[in-house]
Image (tube, rainbow, N blue to C red):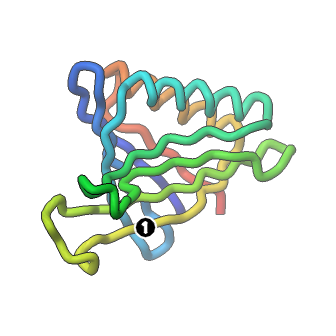
Amino acid sequence: MKQLSISIDLDDYTAGLTGRFETNEFKGFGEGWFNTADIIKFCKGLEQLANSLDGEAELVAGQSKSDGSEYTELFGLRCYVISQTGILGMHVSLTDYPYTDCRLQEVSSVSSELKIEKQIAINFAQDLHRLCLGGASEVRVVGKE
């Protein structure tokens, strides 16, 4: 089973999203900070994508060194159409970066695709929007096998 769960840390107009992803024997964790408005925009875009089966929706947060020499994606959701029969793909990319001047070997990442039906995507988008408004403590989406 593949599943993604997301919790939130709300702070004024920003939000820290913490993602936990499980796929078969692998598990991963990552978190990123967003403007709450950007998360809500992603939710609307995902809902529109699921209804029209056209386009893409993306929510990505990362960290780079002050000189811009390196970039690490910490939390990424990229959604797209797989089939016009109503199957969407959600590429999940999560990185646990210890926020120290760590060794690259210390960084842990997971990246995989969830295949979800359009109604599941709509429900996930609505649940994530509710999470941003403080109406839930966690959202979860489970992919098809």
Residue drawn at point x = 44 percent, y = 76 percent: 25
47 to the left or right of 25 = right
Residue drawn at point x = 75 percent, y = 46 percent: 81
Compared with 22, 87 (above or below) is above
Residue drawn at point x = 58 percent, y = 31 percent: 123
List the single residue furthest toward the left.
100
Compared with 73, 46 (above or below) is above
117 to the left or right of 7 = right
Residue drawn at point x = 45 percent, y = 28 percent: 38
Residue located beneath label 1 in the image:
110
State which quadrant residue 95 falls in: bottom left
Q: Position of residue 105 (x, y in %)?
A: 27, 80
List the single residue furthest toward the right.
84
Q: Position of residue 8 (x, y in %)?
A: 30, 36
Could you say which is closer to the camera, residue 2 or residue 62?
A: 62
Report the quarter where the N terminus lies: bottom right
Amino acid type indicated by mark 1: Val
Secondary structure beneath dot 1 equals strand
Q: Position of residue 64 (x, y in %)?
A: 31, 55
Could you say which is closer to the camera, residue 144 or residue 106?
A: 106
List the single residue furthest toward the bottom.
105
53 to the left or right of 63 = right
Q: How many marks?
A: 1
List the single residue furthest toward the front.
67
Report the quarter where the C terminus lies: bottom right
Could you say which is closer to the camera, residue 11 or residue 136?
A: 11
State which quadrant residue 30 falls in: bottom left
Compared with 51, 77 (above or below) is below
Q: Bin the neighbour count of mark 1 within 10 Å (Cα to Cα): few under 14, some 14-19, many 20 and up.
A: some
